[in-house]
Amino acid sequence: MWLIVNEKELKAYFEGLRGLLWEKVKPSPPQEKTCPKEPEIRQVLLRYLNQTVEVGTEAGNVAGVLQVVGADYAQIEESGGTIVVIPFRQINFVQTV
């Protein structure tokens, strides 16, 4: 299993954990997630356009036909007809089904 970790988020996580354990450091406020590799993710997704794919996110996996690849999102139609829009910053992996 591969994980993509944002260095700033990882540091903030451990600072917050240290603060909880030793109560010396206050957790830093949550920052907006950014995906430094959005253009790379977009290029990968474009290869799978109009194909059945499985996209892994923090909330779970989504499987269906990749219909649209926008500037910063992917649109998938699930087998039941539900349209799911996923921002690139939430994508952990993409694979064909």
Image (cartoon, helix red, strand yellow):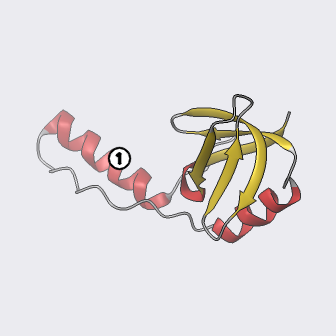
- Quarter in which the N terminus is drawn: top right
Front position in the image: 82 or 44: 82
Tell me: residue 93, above or below residue 74. Answer: above
Tell me: residue 57, above or below residue 32. Answer: above
- Whole-percent x, y for residue 19 in the image: 19, 43
Q: Is residue 41 left or right of residue 28?
A: right
The quadrant in which residue 54 appears is top right
Q: Is residue 79 left or right of residue 6?
A: right
- Residue pointed to by mark 1: 13
Q: Is residue 96 left or right of residue 1?
A: right
Q: Residue at x 63, y 45 (%)?
A: 92
Residue type at mark 1: give it: Tyr
Q: Residue at x 34, y 46 (%)?
A: 14
Q: Residue at x 66, y 35 (%)?
A: 62
- Whole-percent x, y for residue 50 in the image: 86, 51
Badge 1 density bin: few <14, some 14–19, many ≥20, Cα 10 Å? some
Q: Secondary structure at mark 1?
A: helix
- Whole-percent x, y for residue 72 in the image: 60, 66
Q: Residue most toward the front?
A: 81
Tell me: residue 11, above or below residue 20. Answer: below
- Quarter in which the C terminus is drawn: top right
Front position in the image: 26 or 74: 74
